[in-house]
Amino acid sequence: MVFEKIKRAFSDRSDDMGEDYLEIDVGQEKKDKKVIVKLFVMTHYDDVNQILNSLREGYTIAIIDIKTLKQKDSIELKRAISKVKKTIEAMEGTIAGFGENLVIATPSFAKIHKEAEQKKEKRDLLY
């Protein structure tokens, strides 16, 4: 008896759904998105959450100024950069430091050209 009520409940729902559906064009949504280059100033460890949220959206290239946090607390800076690095690696993006006070993080669609990688490739070709 209980099983029949459950069976009826499921069968009634499937009949109601019938042909009512909504088609979504996912390709169109991606075309409308634009890449945003955002500057972040990291003054506290908690600032890393805002950076990560922007990067996870998928269309943000983050330029992070670490000078203030570097002067305040280098241990917190290392923790924050490590967290950003792990997230970027999980997203198959790229992260690189520029100078002493800037870090750039990109999602998977963009790659940072690193001079060291180019030299290594040339060296590998020679041998």
Image: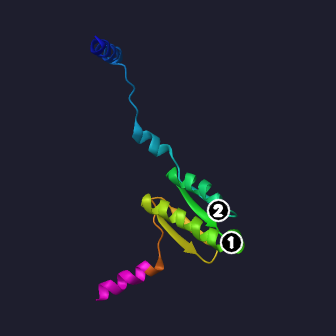
Which residue is nearer to you in this view: 100 or 74?
A: 74
| Crowdedness near tag 2: few (<14), some (14–19) or many (≥20) residues, C-alpha within 10 Å | some
Which of the marked residues, 1 or 2, is nearer the chain's N terminus? 2
Q: Residue furthest front?
A: 1
53 relative to 118 in the view: left or right = right
Vertical placement of 126 versus 88: above or below? below
The residue at the point 34 percent across, 14 percent down is: 9
Q: Is residue 19 magenta?
A: no
Which residue is nearer to you in this view: 62 or 8?
A: 8
Q: Quadrant of residue 44?
A: bottom right
Q: Residue furthest bottom?
A: 127
Tag 2 residue: 45
Tell me the quarter of the image containing the C terminus: bottom left
Q: Position of residue 38 (x, y in %)?
A: 61, 58
The residue at the point 47 percent across, 72 percent down is: 113
Q: Position of residue 121 (x, y in %)?
A: 36, 81
Vertical placement of 18 versus 37: above or below? above
Q: Secondary structure at mark 1?
A: loop
- Give the residue type that dot 2 points to: Tyr
Tag 1 residue: 73
Q: Secondary structure at mark 2?
A: loop
Q: Residue furthest top?
A: 1
Residue span colored magenta: 117-127
Instruction: Specify the principal SS of the magenta part.
Output: helix
| Crowdedness near tag 1: few (<14), some (14–19) or many (≥20) residues, C-alpha within 10 Å | few
- Give the residue type that dot 1 points to: Asp
The residue at the point 38 percent across, 29 percent down is: 23
96 relative to 11 in the view: left or right = right
Q: CA distance from mark 1 to mark 2?
A: 9 Å
**For the residues bearing labels 1 and 2, Cβ distance under 8 angstroms:** yes
